[in-house]
Image (cartoon, rainbow, N blue to C red):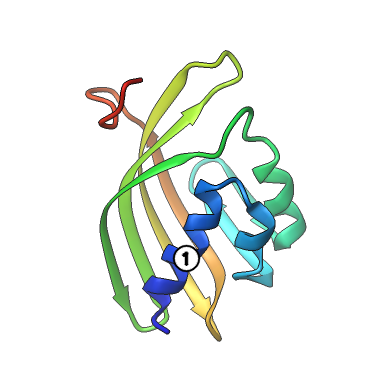
Amino acid sequence: MKNIRILQIANEFIAKGDYESFLAYCTADTKWVFVGDRILHGKEEVRAYMKEFPQEPPVFNVEKSIEEGDSVMVTGEIRLRNKAGKYEHFDYCDIWRFEDGKMAELKAFVNEKHGSPLSSSE
């Protein structure tokens, strides 16, 4: 199976709020780098990060996905409900590195979106 498809399947679990099934697609020593923010080392830190989502899973609108070798680059928009119950909108570019069919590393560039939000009622 191609890495781009593995990422799509894993992200379907995120959309359902099933973070444990998503984590099954990550290596035990997965590393997530949120440029300019924080670095997560291993599944436990990623699991703790996912518990920070206040009310519901993030909503992704993927614009483009490109696979080359062991890497997948994805761009798009994310919508998150904050603790006050309002949606925040972000543009993102994720670069994933895979090892043996699992997500080993993420380098994420995320910026708050100032303009038209995702196509939704919010």
> Which residue sits furthest top?
84
Q: Tell which of 58 and 96 is nearer to you.
A: 58
Residue at (65, 44) in percent of width and height: 50
Percent position (x, y) of residue 31?
62, 63
The amino acid beneath tag 1 is Ile
Circle 1 residues within 10 Å: few <14, some 14–19, many ≥20: some
Element on which disc 1 rests: helix
For label 1, the residue is 9
Kindly indicate the quadrant of the structure image that contains residue 121: top left
Write down the quadrant of residue 91 in the picture.
top left
122 sits left or right of 32 in the view = left
Screen quadrant of the N terminus: bottom left
Task: Give whichever of 116, 11 is nearer the camera.
Answer: 11
Instruction: Say left or right for 99 vs 88.
Output: right
Residue, far right: 44
Compared with 58, 14 (above or below) is below
